[in-house]
Image: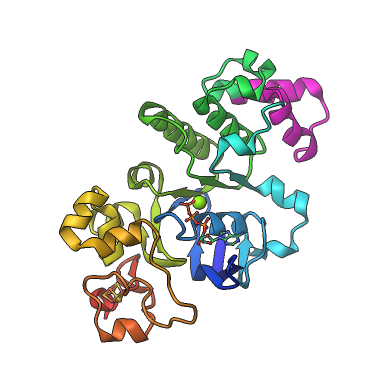
Amino acid sequence: MEFRNVCQYFNDKNGGIVTAAEDVNLSINYGEAVALVGESGSGKTTLGRLSVGLGRPSKGEILLNGKNLSMFKRQELRGKAQYIHQDPYSSLDPYLSVREVLERPLIYVRDIKDPERREEIMARMLDGMGLESFYLSKSVRELSGGQKQRILLARAFVIEPEYVVADEPTTMVDFVRRNEIITLLSNLRTKMGTSVLLITHDVSVASKLSDRVAVMYKGEIVEYGATSEVLDNPLHPYTLALLSVTPEKLMKQEGPLLAATRKGTVVIPSKFEGCRYSFVCPYAFDRCRGERPRLIEVSPGHKVACFKVAG
Ligand SMILES: Nc1ncnc2c1ncn2[C@@H]1O[C@H](COP(=O)(O)OP(=O)(O)OP(=O)(O)O)[C@@H](O)[C@H]1O
Ligand code: SF4
Ligand SMILES: [Mg+2]
């Protein structure tokens, strides 16, 4: 999966333009998991949806196996790239049975005609999810939040896709269930060799599940590299803020403006050419307000977009 100079702009309700993604370059290798982390509204879901063909980028291109997504037929792309929605409540029809949820992709995407074979695949899939096969007859509305989350994983992986976007796969579950979901996702991707784009604002989830991490701020990737390297040795001022423990602590340490950005209250004027973080960055200097920092490699594979760090 490859994003090349991807930009996405939306019209907001006041007639302005929202920059949800700005000049994003990112690639995900075969079998690799890359995490997108960043605060609410930083553009994570936007990139995830674009990467499975849900919408086209305003600029730039997205390729799967070297082929532009726009060249795929819809059904062909569904068989290769799956998106696990961040809200299991709205993305699963409560009136369907678990069987209907899982069987539809087997019929319409994998074109498996033999009902016994479908039954066998679904039972195996549920077993892998720690759910017994009688769950197939249950209705979605009878499931708990954690079970719904598992069915969403099962629905995506039953297709045996090459690439999966998991958008906040643990937000709807408590701490214990969170670890279970992470383990399931990790096992599935290892077993099937699937490439994963993991979207999360929870750095601990990224640390458990991803090989590399891209930190996003207001539509841009500001830091990128091997997960252990970025999390152990964060360099961008925003990554440092993101990794600090609580908003209260942040407020005390770095002043109210950083807390404000975590709440998404900083609005970047359109056509602003400087560093998008300069409105709240405690280290901002004149250059930051007039020029956009580009991602520069500071050590092998570790890139940072900041004049203070990378010059
Ligand atoms: N269809 C749309 N129309 C207008 N604006 C949109 C649309 N989709 C997203 N946006 C805006 O684009 C920006 C990025 O949104 P996105 O949903 O990608 O963020 P996110 O990082 O996934 O946030 P969250 O963590 O809250 O899910 C936000 O400012 C959002 O309001
Ligand atoms: S470029 Fe300047 S404003 Fe942007 S993060 Fe670095 S120091 Fe802060
Ligand atoms: Mg989102």
Quarter of the image for residue 54 reads: bottom right
Q: Is residue 111 magenta?
A: yes
Q: Position of residue 103 (x, y in %)?
A: 74, 29
- Which residue is the extreme one toward the top? 134
Figure quadrant of the C terminus: bottom left
Q: Residue at x 43, y 73 (%)?
A: 268
Left or right of 291: which side holds 138?
right
Question: Range of the magenta residues?
Answer: 96-125
The vertical placement of 134 against 145, above or below, is above
Q: Let me know if residue 99 appears in the view.
A: yes
The dominant secondary structure in magenta is helix
Name the one closer to the observer, 227 or 104: 104
Q: Let me know if residue 5 appears in the view.
A: no
Q: Is residue 136 magenta?
A: no
Q: Residue at x 34, y 46 (%)?
A: 207
- Which residue is the extreme one toward the front? 14
Q: Position of residue 243 (x, y in %)?
A: 27, 53
Q: Total label count?
A: 0
The vertical placement of 140 against 51, above or below, is above
Q: Residue at x 48, y 44 (%)?
A: 168
Q: Position of residue 108 (x, y in %)?
A: 79, 38
User: What colour scheme governs how the chains and residues are painted in the rendered image of this protein?
Assistant: rainbow
Q: Position of residue 251 (x, y in %)?
A: 21, 56
The vertical placement of 215 against 292, above or below, is above
Left or right of 195: which side holds 284?
left
Q: Residue at x 40, y 29 (%)?
A: 174
Q: Quadrant of ligand 2?
A: bottom left
Figure quadrant of the N terminus: bottom right
